Amino acid sequence: MRRRIRRWRRRLRPLTSTPLFPLLSVFTAGAIGYRWTENWDWGDCFWGVLVTLTTVGYGDQVPNTDAGRWVTAAILVGGLVVVQQTLQWMLSLQETGYFQLRRRQRQLREIQRMRQHVILCGYGRIGREIADQLIAEGVRLLVIENSPEDARAARERQLEVLEGDATLDETLQEAGVFDCRALVAALPNNAANLYVVLSARGLSSGCRLIARADSKEAERKLRLAGADAVVSPYISGGRQMAAIALRPLAINFLDLLAGSNCEVEEFQLRSDVARCAAIDGRSLTELDLGRRTDGALVLAIQSRSGLIANPNGSTQLQAGQRLIVMGSPSQLQAMERLLGEALEDASVLKA
């Protein structure tokens, strides 16, 4: 019995610490008073208390005894004080940011349910382009942004936004860095991106990290910090402009490919040799991938020893390799079925 009483006390403690408890007490005591003095049913008793406290005036029922009038007077006096305290308490909640805190807690609960999403740190000019590409691919995206203006712009695009400093471990943990598919550090400052990469790599050793850099030195330091890939918008833009100047036909072909039904997909093979037994050590010719997938083309194979571009038929597949394959959606699905248990992960990028 004592345990039950203590348990109910713990449950009621949040209520008793607010003016809602005195307000509820006034309602209950007033209803009991009307029940005792006027002999009304309980519905009329609580209705009478409500009419009295809101001062809307009596219409359907009026206290007929002196005792009932004393009860009404007590309700009016006590109710005015309690209602005033309740209103002041509600206004103080607004001033102290209570409702914003509750909204953030609800948002964090929704974020904690996200899996295999991409975390984008920074929604500036580069971040917006990245977000557009990921949205086009149907990837679930979470934006971390510290600027209220940029956060508002991301919400206008119906994106999930977590306002906070991406360089802090706490913010990355709230964003679900342990369960994300990849993290992109696209902040405009090299030092900030370096902090993001260091924090993310310290929290999750298996998270794929892509960072933005504005110089060769920053690229080197970001790779040392643990970034899997570093992209410089200036260097990449310069290389693309030079390629267009020197090889316009090749660039035009890639543009045409991007507008077609053709896709480029990365197939990551498992590192477990036992689960890759069906393909490990077998050449592309032995597997006959082209015929069995109805035309899928292996463009490159990445392994620990380096990148094999345009592999020939004698190239052997091994556990842990990453295959870059081009084909239609049906051909890529056939490739996925063919790899079977040996396949660990597959990600599609429009060519």
Image: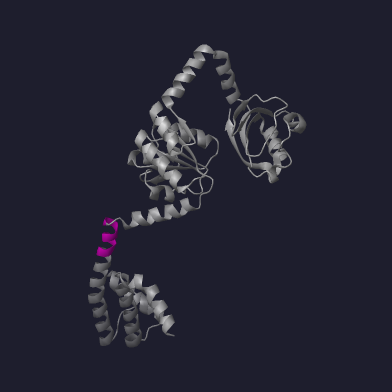
Q: Which residues are magenta?
A: 88-95
Q: On the rendered structure, is 300 left or right of 161? A: right
| 103 lies above or below 335 | below
- Residue 93 vs residue 64, the one in the foreground: 93
Q: Position of residue 169 (x, y in %)?
A: 39, 48
Q: Position of residue 167 (x, y in %)?
A: 37, 43
- Residue 168 vs residue 63, the one in the foreground: 168
Q: Which residue is rendered at x = 33% and y = 83% of the image?
A: 34
Q: On the rendered structure, is 279 left or right of 257? A: right
- Residue 124 vs residue 50, the one in the foreground: 124
| 321 lies above or below 243 | below
Residue at the front extreme, as displayed: 305
Q: Position of residue 346 (x, y in %)?
A: 61, 39
**The C terminus - image quarter:** top right
Q: Which residue is rendered at x = 34% and y = 83% of the image?
A: 32
| The image quarter in which residue 256 lies | top right
- Residue 13 vs residue 270, the one in the foreground: 270
**The N terminus - image quarter:** bottom left
Q: On the rendered structure, is 300 left or right of 130? A: right
Residue at the top extreme, as displayed: 246
Q: Position of residue 284 (x, y in %)?
A: 72, 30
Q: Is residue 36 visible?
A: yes
Q: What kind of secondary structure does the magenta stretch mostly adopt?
A: helix
| 112 lies above or below 208 | below
| The image quarter in which residue 225 lies | top left
